[in-house]
Image: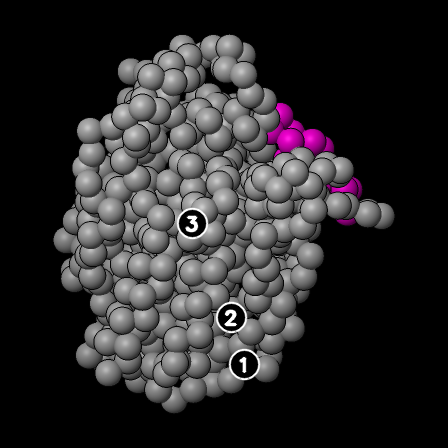
Amino acid sequence: MLKVGFGRANITPAMGIPVAGYAVRRLADGVLDELEVNAIALDDGNKKAVMLSLDNIGIAKVYYEQFKQTICEKVGLKREELFMHCTHTHTGPALRPVSGEEELKMVETYKDFVIKRCVDVAQFALNDLKPAKMGYGVAKAPNIAFIRRYRMKDGSVKTNPGVLNPDILHPIGETDESVSVIRFDRENAESVVLVNFGCHPDTVGGTKISADWPGFTRRFVEKAIDNTKCILFNGSEGDVNHVNVHPTKGDFNDMFNDFDGCSRGYGHARHMGRVIAGAVMQVYDKVNYVEDTEIKCLQKTYDIPANVPDPKDMPLARKYHELHLAGRDDEIPYKAMMLTTVVCEAGRMVRLEHGPESFPFLLSAISIGKIALFGIPGEPFNGIGSQLKQTEGFDMIVPCCLVNSHEGYFPMQDSYDEGGYEARVSNFKAGVAEKIIAYGKEMLAEIKK
């Protein structure tokens, strides 16, 4: 019989810690809402697994091994039995090395604190195991997630081109508005609902700590449905965010135009949480209960070619990189999102000037009967998630971003062909998305056997 447990702890940092995102220096100076690490533990009598979800932009590879080894050793898990996800909030601290001795010390201290919290929460969930039945359903959360890459009238492609930009022709791609819901009803204990939706949690902005829409979603679900705990896993969000470039009527309520041309607002994060929670409630009482709840876990490492720069581009890249590090962005001849693009691209080129030629790339899968969660170590484009969901032999496939480290963006081939922020800053050569899809389908076929 399937057993399920739940755990939760606060991971809000001390003030003054660097806030991740935007390639600009931000230091936390307040708290809008608390950051959490949530955990769900699974045990079918033969196999167990723990899935963690942290309110963080992502765990850098240099820290990931310490997280993985410590958690597995402390709670008695095999490596493939730990599925460690970050929601990707842009109003939380970095879990990666930063420049500056004092700020790096804060990040290192916070990292050690979060590891201990993850151990605690994983153990809480394992101690909380109760017999459970499982059901699943899919609903829609309309008009809150949008493809952020656009074809412009001059034929170019821009990421986040700005609200009401008259030069926009159309978005490149289609958004997946589906909300995947997995419900676990436990004997003499609270139910647990796992929610998956794909969109950047980049909605709040500023320098105050917030879990963004994933935190609102959890709170609204738990407030609306008695005796229920909610855990959220963000989906394929690499080319998807909350920005409606053509707002009408009340679409712009509780929002402002931020420094990079994106509209943001804490109230809009709340709105997104309500819409996603509403989608959960559409199907919560009508989930399809299943008998097959056998647990299987699989992790595999592949080599993916690196996006090594052309030597002729290095002089300008080094110039922009040095200006950015010196706080002299005003001397770089770009503004808003294009400034972010050239700065991050220059950083990628300097970082990879001397290789390596490829990176080891860890993919993860956990299946519960015919429902599978597939973990990708970075920010997959929507096309990756959409194609993985079509893999045969499963009732539901749940793609999850930022699982077991943060390796950056994984754009589709057309993004490299046409240009744009994500492809220009990616650590990986063109073809990375298509490789993830192929490897993912192989792993899902293997775990299905």
Q: Which residues are magenta?
A: 251-263
Mark 3 vs mark 1, foreground winner is 3
Residue 237 pos. (x, y %)? 49, 52
Q: Are marks 1 and 2 in contact (CB under 8 Å)?
A: yes
In the rendered structure, find residue 56 and report the number of the disc placed on it: none
SS assignment at label 1: loop
Query: Which residue corresponds to mark 3?
Result: 411
| CA–CA distance in space, label 1 to label 2 | 8 Å
Badge 1, how many Cα within 10 Å: few under 14, some, many 20+? Answer: some
Give, as a three-letter code, the residue at label 2. Answer: Val
SS assignment at label 2: strand
- Residue at the spot x=27%, y=59% of the render? 363
Q: Nearer the viewer, residue 5 or 327?
A: 327
Query: Which residue corresponds to mark 2?
Result: 181
Residue 300 pos. (x, y %)? 20, 61
Mark 3 vs mark 2, foreground winner is 3
Query: Which residue corresponds to mark 1?
Result: 287
Q: How is the image coloured?
A: one colour
Q: Is residue 242 magenta?
A: no
- Residue at the spot x=43%, y=42% of the render? 423
Q: Is residue 91 left or right of residue 257?
A: left
Looking at the image, tell me whether mark 3 or mark 1 is earlier in sequence order: 1
- Residue at the spot x=37%, y=40% of the render? 426
Badge 3, how many Cα within 10 Å: few under 14, some, many 20+? Answer: many
From the viewer's perspective, is residue 222 above or below residue 397?
A: above
Q: Are marks 3 and 1 in contact (CB under 8 Å)?
A: no
SS assignment at label 3: loop
Tell me the chief SS of the magenta region: loop
